Amino acid sequence: MLKLAKLPDRTPVKLAITITPDLAHALSDYVTIYNRTYGDKAEVADLVPAMLDSFLASDRAFAKARREKPGEG
C-alpha cells in the first residue's frame, strides 16, 4: 500500500515549480503507480500538495520548531 492515501474530491490548484529531471521522472513514476493502485487519473500537480502536507505532518523536528517559534503562542 502506498504511504499517500487516495486523495479526496477537490478542486485542482495549479502548481508551478522548477525541479530536476531525476525528480520529475520519480514523480511521474509515482503518479503512474498511484493511478494504477487507486484506478485514478491524478496528475503530478494533484499529488504534490498532499505529498508535501504528509511530509510536513510527519517531520517531528519541524513540528517542534514550529511550536517553539519565538514571539508566538
Image: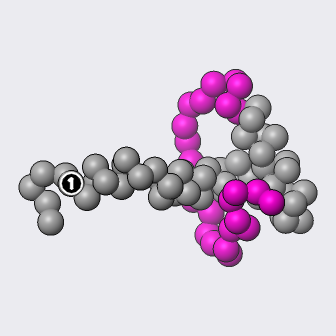
Relative image position of residue 25 (x, y in whole percent): 76, 32
Number of marks in the image?
Answer: 1
- The residue singled out by tag 1 in the image is 68
Residue 14 part of the magenta-drawn span:
yes
Verify whether residue 26 appears in magenta: no
Toward the bottom, the furthest residue is 9
Residue 25 seen anywhere in this rendered image of the structure: yes
Indicate whether 50 appears above or below 27. Answer: below
Answer with the quarter of the image where residue 47 lies. Answer: bottom right
Residue 66 percent location from the top left of the image: 28, 53
Q: In the rendered view, tell whether residue 34 sits above or below residue 19.
A: below
Secondary structure beneath disc 1? loop
Residue range in magenta is 1-24
Q: Amino acid at mark 1?
A: Glu
**Image quarter of residue 49:** bottom right
Q: Which quadrant, please, contains the N terminus?
A: bottom right
x 70%, y 48%: residue? 44
Left/right of residue 51 with respect to residue 41 in the rendered view: left
Q: Nearer the viewer, residue 67 or 25?
A: 67
Q: Quadrant of the C terminus?
A: bottom left
73 with respect to 44 (left or right): left
Q: Position of residue 4 (x, y in %)?
A: 68, 59
Q: Position of residue 34 (x, y in %)?
A: 81, 55
Judging from the image, the colouring scheme is one colour
Residue 49 visible in the displayed image: no
